Image: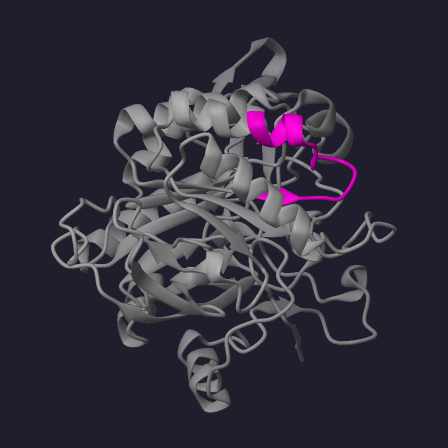
Amino acid sequence: MFRRLSIESESAATGGASFDRRFFLKCALASGASLGAGGVVQPAAGMPAAAQPQQSDAQFVVEARFYDKQPNRRIKCKLCPRACVVGDKERGYCGARENRGGTYYSLVHSRVCAAHVDPIEKKPLFHYLPGSLAFSLATAGCNVNCKFCQNWDISQVRPEQIAAEYLPPYRIAQLAQQYGCPSIAYTYSEPVIFSEYMMDTADAGHESGVRSVVVSNGYIQQEALKAAYGKMDAVKIDLKAFNEKYYHDVVTGQLKPVLETLTTLRKMGKWTEVVYLVVPTLNDSEAEFTGLARWVKANLGPDVPLHFTQFHPQYLLKNLPITPVSTLDRAKAIADAEGLHFVYIGNVPGHPAQNTYCPQCKRLLVERVGFTAGKMLIRKNACPFCGRHIPGIWHT
């Protein structure tokens, strides 16, 4: 009934982890759906979404947690900075929340349209349990519309337009344990829009000894951020650019709320890594790299990992070339010179800047090949050669 589409790295990589086919077929059967090897569950080939059998959404509907009621059965959403004011029988920008008679509902609780067992390095999180696996999942929808989105076919659709499976929080925790995943990852689309499900699943996971990480655009209001991401064990934020024009023209969002998210996460003490997808001609100037590096050092500290990742033509930006490796090298050199200690280059297999080095003695500490971590020498959160503290969450 379903065809499966390949999910690549969350940062638009050109490959994926290689796993045994039978492993994913077992995962599919265990979850009761065709989930696994390809990650994304889609309607059968040749059958438009509108022609799919209609599925009752009652089991997926829960009252939203972040909104205010307004006169005349209107509501004001308090989840993301858009602050949508939604009339009765209407939906917010994300398409995943609906006003029904003056009560706002999430339509995607436990409504999983993508699931995959990924290496944690694929998120990418480099200072969080290297070499481990994450049970990764998504629902349909997003609160922005990035022109380079590689998963646009799940992020830019309404929940009823794509096949999904009912996977309640306790079941996700079970699957994570079953397949040896110490973490659940909320990813692929935008977890902000399924915050209620993410929070409930994180609770279920923690009760079973399974952690939670989120891969997010950081476009979220402060109250919701503290409530939802307060339940996370690690956070990866995609900082799309360091200028408002790019956010307006390419992302359909705003930069300022994302910077506020990052500074709040810092104050909360959440382990956070930042990814910057370098898009040729649009956000790759030396001035932007310099401003970004200085902001990160001043507001997040020099030890926060910063990943510069290679762009590949996707979705609405197919006219641009792949990011030259020389541009990524230049970005890293600028960030290094500004005093950041852990600057990585992503989506370039074999590049030495995928490895972790001690900022003090410069010795290799974590060696990575593709999305796998091989050599891992960090002991007791420190460099074994010089004793320098290496920030991160290195062991379960």
Report the quarter where the N terminus lies. bottom right
Report the quarter where the C terminus lies. bottom left
Instruction: Give the quadrant of residue 348.
Output: bottom right
Give above or below for 156 relative to 24.
above
Seen from the viewer's position, the closer of residues 298 and 384 is: 384
- Which coloring applies here? one colour
Furthest residue toward top: 71
Q: In the rendering, at what x and y percent does residue 211 appear?
A: 26, 54
The residue depicted at 58 percent of the width and 9 percent of the height is: 71
**Magenta stretch: residue 286 in it?**
yes
Give the left or right position of residue 65, taking residue 74 as reference.
left
Q: In the rendering, at what x and y percent does residue 371 appear?
A: 46, 68
Furthest residue toward front: 361
Q: Tell me if residue 130 can be seen.
A: yes
Q: Give the range drawn in magenta.
A: 276-290
Give the left or right position of residue 154, taking residue 218 as reference.
right
Seen from the viewer's position, the closer of residues 237 and 101 is: 237
Give above or below for 65 relative to 186.
above
Instruction: Give the quadrant of residue 253.
Output: top right
**Magenta stretch: residue 273 in it?**
no
Give above or below for 304 relative to 288.
below
Total labels: the figure holds 0
The residue depicted at 46 percent of the width and 21 percent of the height is: 260
Q: In the rendering, at what x and y percent does residue 325 appear?
A: 66, 55
Q: In the rendering, at what x and y percent does residue 114 appear?
A: 55, 63
Instruction: Give the quadrant of residue 364.
Output: bottom left
Furthest residue toward bottom: 22
Q: Tell me if residue 77 can be seen.
A: no
Furthest residue toward right: 319
Seen from the viewer's position, the closer of residues 260 and 308 is: 308
Seen from the viewer's position, the closer of residues 100 and 179 is: 179
